[in-house]
Image (tube, rainbow, N blue to C red):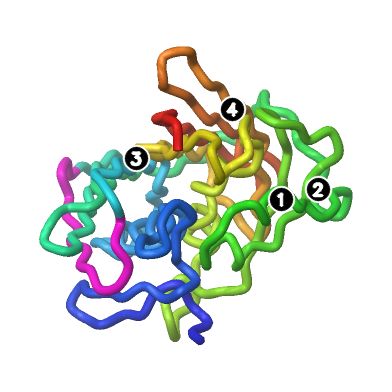
């Protein structure tokens, strides 16, 4: 057993461990940890002081297979104060994920700083959440989950954390650790019970906007899930660390009968 989600094979190649295993298919990776690894690759690419990853956009082009894969990263739009980066995950002979990130310069805006999203109760005020046990897979098993009272299908406030590094033998930055759990938002307040003869509702993307860099190991998700009448849904979350809200995430869903 490994104590990380991925092994670094060198030269941009990686291998997933069982902790990255997905929930819909035992032979695929969960989107959450691979988005964390892609974030790490974006951070590592030509880093510059005074710049922050502020928008992360992940398009999922198909099944994310387990095992070995490659990530390549480039600057799409260079700039002194605004840059656009791109990272591609290649696995089994095809592109599985395209990630793009806006990197913005940081400034002193304390005099005008304001946040409209309310804070949610912290993990110490939350209790165990058995709802996540309905999901299979190594990634879900890696999570410690605490639910805030008032949780119901389609609406919930949950705190999650995990004990594993993103890469073996390397310290995991807080933003990588927290982004690497965000895709779990689609499962914390499911409108229907997963599995059996129910409905499946995988997301085809993950869009994250960060108005500040987060800190710590706990990720708070203040989540709403919408199912439309035409087979399309949306999971929307305000994301928190222990200091309060630090951004938002959106996931567009394809809803279909199992």
Instruction: Please indicate whether residue 175 sits to the left or right of residue 54 in the image.
Output: right
Question: In terms of secondary structure, where does tag 1 sit?
Answer: strand
Quarter of the image that includes the C terminus:
top left
- Magenta region: 64-78
Are dots 2 and 1 in contact, CB under 8 Å? yes
Are dots 2 and 4 in contact, CB under 8 Å? no
Crowdedness of circle 1 by 10 Å Cα count: few (<14), some, many (20+)?
many
In this rendering, the label closer to the viewer, 2 or 1: 1
Q: Which residue is mark 1?
A: 159
Residue positioned 16% across, 54% down in the render: 74
**Where is residue 202 shown, x and y percent of the image?**
43, 39
Q: Which residue is mark 4?
A: 225
How many marks the image carries: the answer is 4
> CA separation, marks 1 and 4?
17 Å
> CA separation, marks 4 and 3?
19 Å
Q: Which residue is mark 2?
A: 122
Q: Examine the rendering and report whether any part of residue 116 can be seen.
A: yes
User: Does the stretch in magenta take in 68?
Assistant: yes
Are dots 3 and 2 in contact, CB under 8 Å? no
Q: Examine the rendering and report whether any part of residue 111 can be seen.
A: no
Residue positioned 29% across, 62% down in the render: 65
Which numbered dot is residue 57? 3
């Amino acid at each position: 057993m490994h104590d990380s989600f991925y092994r670094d094979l060198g030269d941009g190649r990686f291998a997933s461990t069982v902790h990255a295993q997905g929930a819909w298919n035992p032979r695929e990776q969960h989107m959450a940890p691979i988005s964390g690894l892609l974030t790490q690759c974006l951070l590592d690419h030509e880093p510059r002081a005074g710049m922050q990853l502020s928008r992360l956009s992940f398009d999922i082009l198909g099944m994310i297979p387990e095992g070995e894969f490659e990530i390549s990263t480039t600057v799409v739009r260079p700039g002194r104060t605004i840059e656009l980066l791109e990272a591609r995950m290649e696995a089994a002979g095809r592109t599985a994920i395209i990630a793009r990130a806006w990197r913005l310069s940081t400034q002193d805006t304390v005099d005008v700083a304001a946040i409209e999203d309310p804070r949610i109760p912290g993990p110490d005020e939350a209790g165990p959440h058995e709802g996540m046990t309905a999901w299979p897979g190594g990634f879900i098993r890696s999570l410690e989950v605490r639910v805030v009272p008032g949780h119901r299908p389609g609406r919930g406030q949950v705190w999650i954390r995990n004990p594993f590094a993103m890469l073996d033998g390397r310290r995991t930055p807080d933003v990588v650790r927290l982004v690497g759990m965000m895709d779990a938002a689609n499962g914390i307040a499911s409108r229907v019970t997963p599995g059996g003869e129910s409905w499946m509702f995988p997301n085809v993307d993950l869009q994250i906007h960060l108005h500040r860099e987060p800190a710590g190991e706990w990720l708070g998700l203040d989540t709403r899930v919408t199912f439309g009448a035409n087979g399309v849904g949306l999971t929307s979350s305000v994301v928190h660390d222990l200091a309060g809200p630090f951004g938002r995430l959106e996931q567009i869903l394809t809803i279909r009968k199992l």
